[in-house]
């Protein structure tokens, strides 16, 4: 993001992993940041503390991305820090690694709710706000290489949710391009975060590394840098 035009960036799921690195990069670049988390306030506080030396406002808010009322409240709270110039929809979940035949409907619904509806609801809240103010802005939705590879035997419902994010983002970009609102996707490959332990396989990043062209998993900082660049002017 350009240093010349500071503003507020909203990041969902900024308490750890890729999102935490995104928060830190924007704060370091001189932007205020409002980030959300789901259930780990101590992790969110660690991110806030790490950003203290940068001299900007960094605020952590517990807000489930699936709740449309909270999405609107998050945007309003962010606008109070300074003009919102960007949104990064990073919050996302997989589910237990395994065969699709073993995935129950609640799990599928949960993954779709967080990854797809959560992203749509946050985009709608921020774009409504920008359009009402006649403001421009930039959105990055975090997808996954799973959208292209399909993740067979691991979580194909997750892959489907990320493919939905990509299709949705193409439409969002086209619908609002003439108002100066940009929307893009960053699709990380396997990245070394806690998401794999939450999927039941803490060592997944090392297991899949030999299949990755660079023979290693991504570092969350590398993904954050791509997101920050994509959000920038
Ligand atoms: P992570 O380490 O598990 O962190 C996920 C973050 O999202 C946490 O801050 C979590 O909050 C938050 N979150 C989860 N559900 C939420 C909800 N309902 N409402 C609000 N926040 C919620 O994940 P990550 O690996 O950094 O992944 C970040 C994004 O990259 C996800 O969209 C993921 O699908 C995508 N991605 C990751 C990889 C990878 O290999 N790591 C690869 C491709 C794509 P709490 O801390 O409070 O739980």
Image (tube, rainbow, N blue to C red):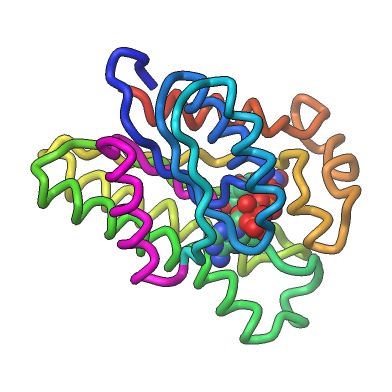
Q: Quadrant of the N terminus?
A: top left
Q: Nearer the viewer, residue 69 or 93?
A: 69
Residue at point 72%, 42% (across, down)? 190
Where does the magenta region start and end? 66-92
Q: Quadrant of residue 34?
A: top left
Q: As drawn, is 27 to the left or to the right of 93?
A: left
Instruction: Count the labels in the image.
Output: 0
72 drawn magenta: yes
Q: Residue furthest top?
A: 4
Q: Quadrant of residue 95?
A: bottom right
Question: Which quadrant is the C terminus positioned in?
Answer: top left
Q: Residue at x 80, y 65 (%)?
A: 97
Q: Position of residue 39 (x, y in %)?
A: 65, 63
Q: Is residue 224 left or right of residue 5?
A: right
Q: Nearer the viewer, residue 173 or 6?
A: 6
Is residue 159 among the parts visible in the rendering?
Answer: no
Looking at the picture, does residue 12 appear above or below residue 185?
below
In this rendering, the answer to whether 60 lies above or below 158 is: above
In this orientation, which residue lies closer to the viewer: 68 or 157? Answer: 68
Q: x and y percent of residue 48 in the render?
A: 60, 38
Taking the spot 45% from the left edge, 64% from the top edge, the residue there is: 118
Q: Is residue 76 magenta-colored?
A: yes
Direction bottom: furthest residue: 105
Please name the residue shown 58% across and 75% down the image: 110
Tell me where residue 25 appears, x and y as whole percent.
54, 25
Can you see residue 29? yes
């Amino acid at each position: 993001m350009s240093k010349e035009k500071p503003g507020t960036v909203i990041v969902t799921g900024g308490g750890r992993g890729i999102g935490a690195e995104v928060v830190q990069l924007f704060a370091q670049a001189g932007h205020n940041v409002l980030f959300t988390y789901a259930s780990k306030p101590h992790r969110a506080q660690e991110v806030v503390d790490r950003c203290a030396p940068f001299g900007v406002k960094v605020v952590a808010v517990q807000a489930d991305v699936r709740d449309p009322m909270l999405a609107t409240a998050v945007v309003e709270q962010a606008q109070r820090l300074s003009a919102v110039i960007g949104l990064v929809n990073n919050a996302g979940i997989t589910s237990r690694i395994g065969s699709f035949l073993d995935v129950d409907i609640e799990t599928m619904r949960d993954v779709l709710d967080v990854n797809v509806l959560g992203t749509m609801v946050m985009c709608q809240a921020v774009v409504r706000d920008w359009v009402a103010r006649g403001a421009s802005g930039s959105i990055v939705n975090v997808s996954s290489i799973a959208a292209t590879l399909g993740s067979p035997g691991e979580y194909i419902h997750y892959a489907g949710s990320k493919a939905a994010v990509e299709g949705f983002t193409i439409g969002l970009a086209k619908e609002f391009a003439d108002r100066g609102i940009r929307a893009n996707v960053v699709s990380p490959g396997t990245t070394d975060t806690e998401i794999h332990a939450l999927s039941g396989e803490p060592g997944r990043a090392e297991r899949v590394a030999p299949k990755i062209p660079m023979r290693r998993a991504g570092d969350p900082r590398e993904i954050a840098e791509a997101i920050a660049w994509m959000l920038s002017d």
